[in-house]
Structure formats: C-alpha cells, structure tokens
Amino acid sequence: MFTEPYHYTRAFAEQLDGQDELARFRDEFYLNPDSIYMDGNSLGLLSKRAEQSLLRVVDAWKTRGIDGWTQGEHPWFYMAEQLAALSAPLVGAAADEVIVTGSTTTNLHQLVATFYKPEGSRTKIVADALNFPSDIYALQSQLRLHGLDPAEHLIQVQSRDGRLIEEADIIAAMTEEVALVILPTVLYRSGQLLDMERLTAEAHARGILIGFDGCHSVGAVQHHFSQWGVDFAYWCNYKYLNSGPGGVGGLYVNRKHFGRMPGLAGWFGSSKDKQFDMEHRFVPAADAGAYQIGTPHIISMAPLIGSLEMFAEADLTRLRQKSLKITSYMMGLIEQELSGMGFTIGNPRDDQRRGGHVSLEHAEAARICKALKENGVVPDFRAPNIIRLAPIALYSTYGDVWDTVQRLKTIMTDKLYEKFENTRDVVA
Ligand SMILES: *Cc1c(COP(=O)(O)O)cnc(C)c1O
C-alpha cells in the first residue's frame, strides 16, 4: 500500500495528517507533549469530554447527595442503560441487548454462570490456547463450580504457529461434547481478528452456544453481534473506549435469550419498577439489564459518557478506516526502515483478519520497549517477545508513527537497548 520511495519521509506523514478527517479529535485528548503514546489498546488516554462528564457526576454527588440517583443531567439509576444505548452501535446490537456493568472478568463469570449448562455428554467448553489468562481462569473456576475437572472439560484450541488460531481448527473442536464456545474477537498478542460470523454459524449448526470477549475490538472494529446471532459478548471500556483505569465494562446478550434467569443474581438486575419493592422474589429485568448484580460503580462509569459521545461523532466506520490505514502505514515503514534488524510482524496482514494494533516480534523485545520509553515512545510489551504498537484513530497521527519507527531504528542501530535487561517490569 505504501511502497513508493516518497512515502518514506516525514513530509509524507504530514501530508497524510493533513488529509485526516478525524484529526480534530486529537486536540480533545490529554497527550503528553514529551512522549508518543502507542499503548491506547491497553489503556486509552483521557479526553477532555470524559473528564468533564466525570466532573459533572462528581458535582451531582456534591450538590444533590442521594437525589443524584434520580435527578440531574445523568441520573445514576438509569446510567447503565443510557450508556448501553450509546454502546450498542459499536457492537451492532439493539440498545436493550447491551448493559454497561461489571468488568470483563466478572461479566464472563456472569455469562458462563448463565449460559453454561452441562448436560449428559455435552459438558465441554471450547476456548483457545492464546486467550488472555483471566478469561481462562474464569472458565476453569466455572467448571470447578460444576464439579468438573478443567483438564478434561476445557478444550483449548492450539495455535499452529504460536500467533494465530485457525477458524478451521476451532470448528473442528466443536464436537457433540461441547456446550459452549468462548473466544476473543481479536487476540491480544497477535492482533488476529477472528471471523465471528462464520464461527457463530458453525457453532449454532452444531447446537452450541458461543460468546466473544470484545476487549481488543470494541471501539476499533465494527461488530454485528445481533445480525450474526452471537449469543453473548463482554468487553472492557478502558482500552479503545478511553473510559479510564478500571472503568466499568459492558456486555451483550442476544434478545432470543431474554427472560433467562441470570446465573448470578443481584438487586440491580431487577426489573426497574420492581427493584424498590424490596421483595425477596427476584424479578429480573426483561432485557440485558438483568445481568447487573449490585449497585453500579457510578464514578467509574461517568467518563464513558463523554467518551461515547465522541465515538458517536467520529463514527466507527471512519475510525476503522483510519485504524487500518495508519497501521498499514506503520507496517510499511517497519518493513522499509527496520529490515534486517531482527523484527517480524506477527499480526495478519489482511484487513479482514487484523484488529487495531501492530504486533512486532523481536528476541530483545523487553529491552527494546524499555529503550523506547526512555526515548519518548510508550509501547506495550507482552512476554516473551512482543512489542505491541497501537496508533489510535482518535488521537494518533501519521507523524507519531513516523517518529516511532525512526526512534526504533536509532535504538537498533545505536544498540541503545543494550543498557537494559531483557526482562519485563511488573506491569507489562
Ligand atoms: C483487558 C482484557 C481483560 C481484562 O479483564 P478485566 O476484568 O477488565 O481486568 C480480560 N480479557 C481480555 C481478552 C482483555 O483484553
């Protein structure tokens, strides 16, 4: 895509920035002037609008006390549902199929507690060998709660090359012993985007339910969960959606499952008109709201109000287009400028098969990341050998990408990484 010699200049990067129709959003974020942020797929940056919505909610607490639940600009009692309506277009669902609640891991627990019903010889859960550890821990513990041994009942589809999971291998694992399939939308290391539509159709053809972890795709990639018939999904809002550390997550349940009793019940899952009857008979909400448990973490939800407003304005189609273009530009630069330096691009190259980050492999990855930080670039290291670089459509520039690759080049040619140890720090 970017192959002519003139593409490999800073002037060309600036030309691309000049044509970027999303460029105005950059000014809405708090960017550190001394460093280039390439880690927005791990923790998105704070926007001024997210800060403002947080401050408005704090102010409602300050001025209204308990009346903040029902009064003010964003009454807390309805905030999870209001944010769900704003999130729904990002996942391709109806507003009532989504709820903003919990965290990725707790939502997975809730959904598996609800949808995993081992029966007869159908007892197994299919996952993949490359998923994020927390998802696997949750699945193992859910199996144990049923008195089942994870070693036997959790099937982890293996990768052929250590990077990707082949859809065909997942489908081959969908046997008559499988009750449930849980997969990431985008693999957190290699950035592979799975074919959710195909996997859903194949699971359903075999009478198996399927759910997806959308942490690495929501806010970066389009989804059509309802149209594809995906049974359920869950995600965090602090990566591409910039809702802040520990920000409240989201989940989706297809409407064909409305009316089920949630596996983990709590009073905030009640039908809203019944909740304050304080009866001991639980009447769940008729929609995805039923999967809430306790009092919503209002302060940790508040930044999402401002953040999702920006997503509505920016439009996900445009965000995905820029993300594909800027990551493609980055890969082109890596191949041109860093060739012969021991790097391998580990993510799929096909636009249909990749998410929002570039997965750069190198034997010295840990210390190259430390050198990058020292040289004003914030990357993300994933053991044992991956440098994740995520130029973010809302706030990264082509100039940032050019500078990042140039700094990497200097780090390699001047061996600046050699003064660091090749081991990871406590956080990544
Ligand atoms: C970020 C991430 C998580 C984190 O889960 P939390 O419950 O928010 O800590 C889990 N799974 C995947 C795939 C992730 O990318």
Image (tube, rainbow, N blue to C red):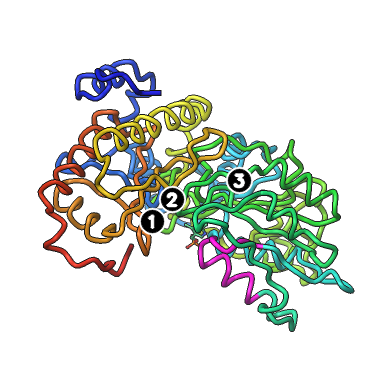
Tag 1, which secondary structure? loop
Of the numbered discs 3 and 2, the one sitting upstream in the chain is 3
Confirm or deny contact between disc 3 and disc 2 (CB under 8 A). Answer: no
What residue would you read off at disc 2? 238
Label 2 CB, ligand 1: below 8 Å?
A: yes
- Residue type pointed to by label 1: Pro
Dot 1 alpha-carbon crowd within 10 angstroms: few under 14, some 14 to 19, many 20 or more: some
Q: Which residue is mark 3?
A: 194
Q: Is residue 207 visible?
A: yes
- Left or right side of 415 for 302: right
Q: Residue type at mark 3?
A: Leu
**Most common secondary structure along the magenta stretch:** helix
- Viewer-proximal residue among 149 and 272: 149
Q: Amino acid at mark 2?
A: Tyr
* Cα–Cα span, label 3 and label 2: 21 Å
Task: From the viewer's side, name the closer residue of 106 and 415.
Answer: 415
Circle 3 or circle 1, nearest the eye: 3
The residue where tag 1 is placed is 245
Position in image of residue 342 (x %, y %): 28, 50
Mark 2: few, some, or many residues within 10 Å (few <14, many ≥20)? many
At 85% across and 54% down in the image, what residue appears?
206
Dot 1 or dot 2: first in sequence order is: 2
Q: Nearer the viewer, residue 153 or 412?
A: 412
Report x, y in % for residue 353.
Answer: 55, 39
